[in-house]
Amino acid sequence: MSDSRTIQYTYDLLSRQSVTPEDCGCQEFISDTLAPSGFVSEQMNFEDVKNVWIRKGTQSPVFVFAGHTDVVPVGDASKWDSDPFVPTLRDGMIYARGAADMKGSIACFMDAAEQFVKDFPDHKGSIAMLITSDEEADAINGTVKVVEVLEKRNEKMDYCLVGEPSSSDVVGDTIKNGRRGSMIGRYTFHGVQGHVAYPQLADNPVHKILPFLQEMVDTVWDEGNEFFPATSFQISNINSGTGATNVIPGECHMMSSFRFCTESSPESLQKRVQDMLDKYGINAEVNWEISGLPFLTGRGKFVDAAMSAVKEVMGFESELSTAGGTSDGRFIAPTGTQVMELGPVNATIHKVNECVKKDDLEKLTEIYYQILKNMLVD
């Protein structure tokens, strides 16, 4: 028995060594495959990043599948049980870098879209795909730039399904209908360098920030709400000193991360941090980087269409969640697009021996097909 189109497409994509921000012909393969079904591709490249906007139809509503062809590095390839760029089937699992994150989802997009337009040539609206090779790296020249172009020419996306691996144990068990915001803080704490034997002549910034750090860690920033978990704060890096054992450092550098819900704003969090710095008399410079604002797609036609599709294919109810990290959905939601994430099980993403269950991809294609049917067929 030959493999389905979904699996054939998956194998082709996984065989390409598209370590971020490389694409290695993935987008060309996607475009060429979908062209006979009436999809028109537009390449939108920015610097070293390849992006493609693929669309069939000119009417609204515009239903978009969004994903990325770039993958994270494999690390030490000798620790893999098989070549990470030679998709290998073992015990029902397909092993390769990008199997779950997220070339498998893209293969499902392709197969579902092809079959849908064949079965429903007179469907309403348009079907599109926004595919980037800059999701796993800086995310500067990828989806965000394509969205800017589309916005400038008033080409609106109504619904967007991101194929990120949202599932926990079984494909379809979790749908991400929103995400928390993400804000990075880069701190420079200033002191006075000196000799450790003469601390009265120096000012150690590491010592001075200790009560400030403790309060930051202990603070309840908010309680969350019915849609989002509470805002969280984590210190990701601290470094100081010259490397010598007898020198009091003159500066200390720190990076921290807020993952925040709609109960807090970047401005409110920044003010609270500054108030704490002032409270402890700490001389500091803080540079803030906001990589995404929180977004939520509430219950309605789109969410119901996805939940109904999972119920029909898998036989159970999905759980709606806003937990986890960020995705390119954060660049699309601010345009007014309703955004959801639905993809494979995420247990092995970014790990050695990343894998996805072959049957799960077959099921995911069915789920995507049913969502299209629920959204674009009267």
Image (tube, rainbow, N blue to C red):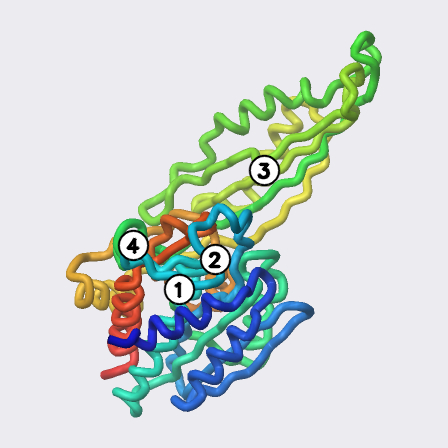
Circle nearer the viewer, 3 or 4: 4
In the rendered image, which residue does mark 2 sit on?
83
Circle nearer the viewer, 1 or 3: 1
In the rendered image, which residue does mark 1 sit on?
163
- Which residue occupies 48% across, 73% down? 130
Where disc 3 sits, the SS reads strand
Q: Disc 2 or 4, which lies upstream in sequence?
A: 2
- Which residue occupies 45% across, 76% down? 129
Between the C-alphas of marks 2 and 4, the distance is 30 Å
- Type of the residue with mark 3: Ser
* Residue 21 found in image quarter: bottom right
State the residue in front, 301 or 74.
74
Between the C-alphas of marks 2 and 1, the distance is 24 Å
- Which residue occupies 61% across, 31% down? 275
Q: State how many labels appear.
A: 4
Where disc 4 sits, the SS reads strand
- Type of the residue with mark 1: Gly
Asked if residue 58 shows in the view, the reply is no
Q: Mark 3–mark 4 contact, CB under 8 Å?
A: no
Where disc 1 sits, the SS reads loop
- Type of the residue with mark 4: Thr
Q: Which mark is residue 256?
A: 3
Q: Disc 4 or 1, which lies upstream in sequence?
A: 1
Circle nearer the viewer, 2 or 1: 2
In the rendered image, which residue does mark 4 sit on?
174
Between the C-alphas of marks 3 and 4, the distance is 28 Å
Asked if residue 226 shows in the view, the reply is yes
Where disc 2 sits, the SS reads loop
